[in-house]
Image (cartoon, rainbow, N blue to C red):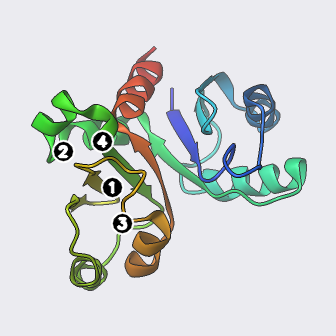
Amino acid sequence: MARFVTLFRGINVSGTQVRMDELKALHKNLGQSDIATYIRSGNVVFTDNETSASQLPAMIEEAFASRFGFQARAVLRTAAELETTIAHNPFVEKAASTPNWLIVLFLAEQPTGEALANLRQTYNGPEEFELVERELYIYYPNGIGRSKLTLPLIEKRLNTYGTGRNWNTVLQLQKMLQG
């Protein structure tokens, strides 16, 4: 049984509203089962035994654009990949004390070492960040709201797109994938 989570980027913010029951229906129409959503930020947990993991993001993005009339990026992770993400958290103590200030940025592709060096040279703020494969863990000591370390800046420097979830959400998605 192949369990996945779709992490949509940029829905239900800035006027792009999509109901979670509509996302469930989208996944059901793609032949997926055991579908559940978590909060309104575009998290969909599902089972798919027919489609390869490498084909799913493009398939879901295409179906999304067709159904809703606008594009939304989709980053997918398997249940095993999410377990690895949790196991490799470089900010364990900070996650325990201030989980809302730890963001995992799930990237579509693994950035090069040169791209990461570019980000480190470009940004010298109070935030701490570590790249582990396709996840960028970012600790925002003053909260994310006023930070200058923004998603557009990160994506530009790393040459890939991604979508962020706070540590509480990551742990909740883990539970859902196990259930």
Left or right relative to 78: residue 11: right
Q: Say which residue label 1 marks.
A: 135
Distance (Cα) linking label 4 and label 1: 16 Å
Residue 149: mark in rendering: 3
**Alpha carbon separation for disc pair 4 and 3:** 13 Å
Q: Which residue is mark 2?
A: 88
Tell me the residue at 77%/25% (across/down): 21
Secondary structure of the residue carrying tag 1 is strand
Image coordinates of residue 179 in percent, x first then y, are 46, 14
Q: Earlier in the sequence, mark 2 or mark 1?
A: 2
Q: Which residue is mark 4?
A: 101
Q: Residue at x 46, y 44 (%)?
A: 77
Name the disc covering residue 30, or none.
Answer: none
- Name the residue type under label 3: Leu
Q: Quadrant of residue 116?
A: bottom left
Query: In this image, 158 relative to 13: left or right?
Result: left
Give percent across and percent down for residue 22.
Answer: 81, 32
Residue 114 spot, x, y in % from top left: 25, 85
Foreground mark, 4 or 2?
4
Asked whether the beta carbons under mark 2 and mark 1 sit within 8 Å of each other, the answer is yes
Dot 1 or dot 3: first in sequence order is 1
Is 97 left or right of 140, judged from the image as shown?
A: left
User: Which is more N-terminal, label 2 or label 3?
Assistant: 2
Q: Amino acid at mark 2?
A: His
Cα–Cα gap, marks 2 and 1:
10 Å
The answer to whether residue 46 is above or below residue 146 is above
